[in-house]
């Protein structure tokens, strides 16, 4: 069993053994912030050393399985979350009670049935609840997502950045998650702006564009898109190159470096802080 640890600023750190946690708590060097799972917060400054970990998720309609392991293969976190199965029933009960109440207590009203409209991006409540649960759990684990207000700004300026359902293309009412750190916000923003301008200049409908994923891969920014027009891929490639020279954390000039087999683009300061080494002989496109 491990105890989860967050730093003074609330950033997740590597977990520790219960014995160490007890010592820290006894010496008033940490406080308990959560009991389920048991999490402590350090009350002193530390170097915020963290290691790269891999998260595996088994999604499903009744259970979500999750595990986090380190590069050495140690299991840090294991969880199975049970999803709510009562949404549909609850909503039907609500409907029945409402109908009965209106029938009982209100004057006669003409039936109205042709003026109902579902909000764009509507999904059945049971499915919506499942999607929300997945996102909630991922955010709990501190998966690298860009800050929410930055994601929302993207969606505000480029409404087509709203996440869409992969099968139906329906809008989902939240921004496409950017699975990278905040330093690349400007690059993502400029990339969107150029794509937006391209569609305008060609009089094409940008809502046809599908964005599958925006993420960091091999230290570079990746935009996975579908159903695009000529020129989009060139814009994306241009910004991918840009990201290989930009620190993913702070947005300053940086270079691609590695730790073990992990690549990340960082400036000198963050290279030291996060414990990476300078990029030397690793063939990136091998
Ligand atoms: Zn930096």
Image: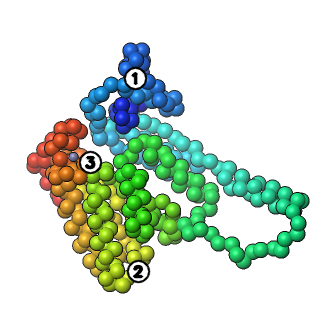
Residue at horizontal 47%, vertical 29%? Answer: 33
Q: Mark 2 or mark 3, which is nearer the start of the sequence?
A: 2
**Tag of residue 30:** 1
Using the image, tell me which numbered label, if any, was put on residue 66: none
Q: Ligand 1 closer than 8 Å to the CB at disc 3? A: yes
Query: CA–CA distance between discs 2 and 1?
Result: 54 Å
Q: Residue at x 16, y 52 (%)?
A: 253
Badge 3 element: loop
Decide which of tag 1 and tag 3 comes sooner along the chain.
1
Residue 281 visible here? yes
Dots 1 and 3: beta carbons under 8 Å?
no
Q: Nearer the viewer, residue 253 or 107?
A: 107
Instruction: Name the secondary structure under disc 1.
Output: strand
Q: Is residue 196 above or below residue 80?
A: below
Residue nearer the viewer, 215 or 245: 245
Q: Residue furthest bottom?
A: 203
Q: Which mark is residue 205?
A: 2
Q: The C terminus is located in which quarter?
A: bottom left
Judging by the rendered image, the residue that carries numbered circle 3 is: 249
Q: Residue furthest left?
A: 281
Image x and y of residue 27, in percent: 38, 15
Instruction: Mark 2 or mark 1: name the one nearer the start of the chain.
Output: 1
Identity of the residue drawn at 71% across and 56% down: 91
Separation of residues labelled 1 and 3 (CA atoms): 27 Å
Query: For mark 2, does the 10 Å Cα neighbourhood hold few (<14), some (14 to 19), or many (20 or more) residues?
Result: few
Is the residue 15 above or below the residue 166 in the image?
above
């Amino acid at each position: 069993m491990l105890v989860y640890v967050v730093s003074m600023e609330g950033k997740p750190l590597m977990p520790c053994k219960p014995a160490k946690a007890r010592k820290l708590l006894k010496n008033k060097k940490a406080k308990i912030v959560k009991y389920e799972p048991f999490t402590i917060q350090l009350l002193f400054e530390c170097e915020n050393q963290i290691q790269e970990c891999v998260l595996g998720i088994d999604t499903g309609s009744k259970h979500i399985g999750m595990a986090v392991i380190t590069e050495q293969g140690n299991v840090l976190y294991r969880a199975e979350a049970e999803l709510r199965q009562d949404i549909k029933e609850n909503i039907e009960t609500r409907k029945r009670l409402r109908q009965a109440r209106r029938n009982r207590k209100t004057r006669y009203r003409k039936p109205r049935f042709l003026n109902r409209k579902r909000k764009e991006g509507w999904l059945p409540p049971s499915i919506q609840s499942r999607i929300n649960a997945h996102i909630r759990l991922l955010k709990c684990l501190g998966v690298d997502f860009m800050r929410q207000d930055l994601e929302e700004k993207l969606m505000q300026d480029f409404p087509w950045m709203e996440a869409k359902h992969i099968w139906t293309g329906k809008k989902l009412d939240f921004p496409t998650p950017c699975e990278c750190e905040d330093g690349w916000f400007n690059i993502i923003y400029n990339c969107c702006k150029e794509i937006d301008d391209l569609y305008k200049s060609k009089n094409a409908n940008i809502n046809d564009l599908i964005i599958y994923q925006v993420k960091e891969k091999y230290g570079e920014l990746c935009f996975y898109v579908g159903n695009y027009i000529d020129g989009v891929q060139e814009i994306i490639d241009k910004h991918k190159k840009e990201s290989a020279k930009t620190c993913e954390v702070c947005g300053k000039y940086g270079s691609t470096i590695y730790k073990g087999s992990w690549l990340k683009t960082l400036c000198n300061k963050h290279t030291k802080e996060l414990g990476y080494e300078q990029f030397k002989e690793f063939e990136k496109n091998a």
